Image: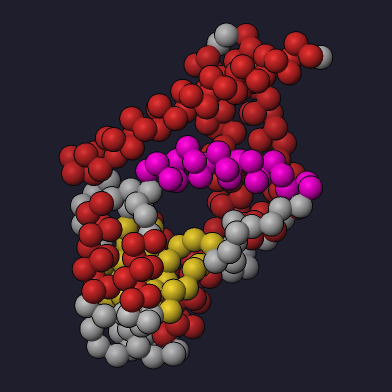
Amino acid sequence: MSEGEVIVKGEYHSSRGDQAHEREILTEGVDHLVLEGPEEDAEYGLFQQWYAFAMLLTEYLFFRVFYTDSSVLEDIAKAQDAEVVKTRESDAAILENSHILVRVFAAVLFLVLFFGAALFGIAGVHFYGVSLLILSAMLPPLVLRLHESTRSSESRNELMANKIANAAEEDGCVVAVVGDSHADEVCDYLPESIDPERKDPKYSWYTWRHFKDIAYPTFVFVSVLWVFYTVFVAYSEFAWNLT
């Protein structure tokens, strides 16, 4: 790779093909690696504990099951003494940067869905119970992310572009790995002085190869969800009987 080169690699986070492609790119040489994710663990206040729990559910039910491990890419970069840059300070930044009304709406939405899941579980209507439990973990953070991406100030894609631009100012080769849905807009936000090389995913999300990538994680997801929901219903029934 040449000095001053900027590569923006779009990926599907669950694609093993993309991860292998990214390893190949990094082994060719990298000075700055930009990855989606938090720089540090979040610290949540008392009124943010609902969000901490929702992120915990999302992390262990979805991200750790379906997403490929980006620490492999970090290890390759660090072996070359490259700087690793994350796109946000912490997971709490999404909540803290949101408008107060959006935060309140997301919190109320979480509580309604979560306690709705408990009530359906106690009533024995498990299909609706587990559906609401999944929604309680996914929907409120999604609302906050959508708000962050569409607000009139710096959007999520613009923030990522700024991280890449700052890394490019220090010279050397910059490789940025972002979700493919972000890649084009991130490139558009980069300064005119930067001419990024845009790399597409190795294959589409609806292909047989990607289906094979997510087949086993899907089995793990269903298994973990079943165990968690069984414990969740048992605890809900215990708490209900105490009242």
Q: Is residue 57 magenta?
A: yes
Quick one: 227 or 34, which is closer to the camera? 227
> Is residue 109 visible to us here?
yes
Query: Quadrant location of residue 62?
Result: top left
Stretch in magenta: 46-66
Q: Residue furthest right?
A: 243
> Is residue 187 visible to us here?
no
In the picture, measured across the screen, residue 157 lies left or right of residue 54, that is left
Q: Residue furthest left?
A: 208
Considering the whole magenta stretch, tell me its main secondary structure: helix
In the picture, measured across the screen, residue 144 lies left or right of residue 86, that is right
In the picture, measured across the screen, residue 189 lies left or right of residue 140, that is left
Q: Quadrant of the N terminus?
A: bottom left
As displayed, is residue 103 above or below residue 93? above
Query: Quadrant location of residue 56?
Result: top right
Quick one: 31 or 183, which is closer to the camera? 31
Q: Quadrant of the C terminus?
A: top right
Tell me the colour scheme of the image: secondary structure
Q: Residue at x 25, y 88 (%)?
A: 2
Quick one: 232 or 169, which is closer to the camera? 232
Query: Quadrant location of residue 169?
Result: bottom left
Q: Residue at x 75, y 11 (%)?
A: 241
User: At which x and y percent is residue 5?
Assistant: 30, 84
User: At which x and y percent is residue 98?
Assistant: 68, 56
User: At which x and y percent is residue 177?
Assistant: 36, 66
As displayed, is residue 37 above or below residue 225? below
Q: Residue at x 22, y 63 (%)?
A: 21
Q: Residue furthest top?
A: 124
As displayed, is residue 7 above or below residue 17? below
User: At which x and y percent is residue 6?
Assistant: 33, 80
Q: Residue at x 33, y 37 (%)?
A: 217
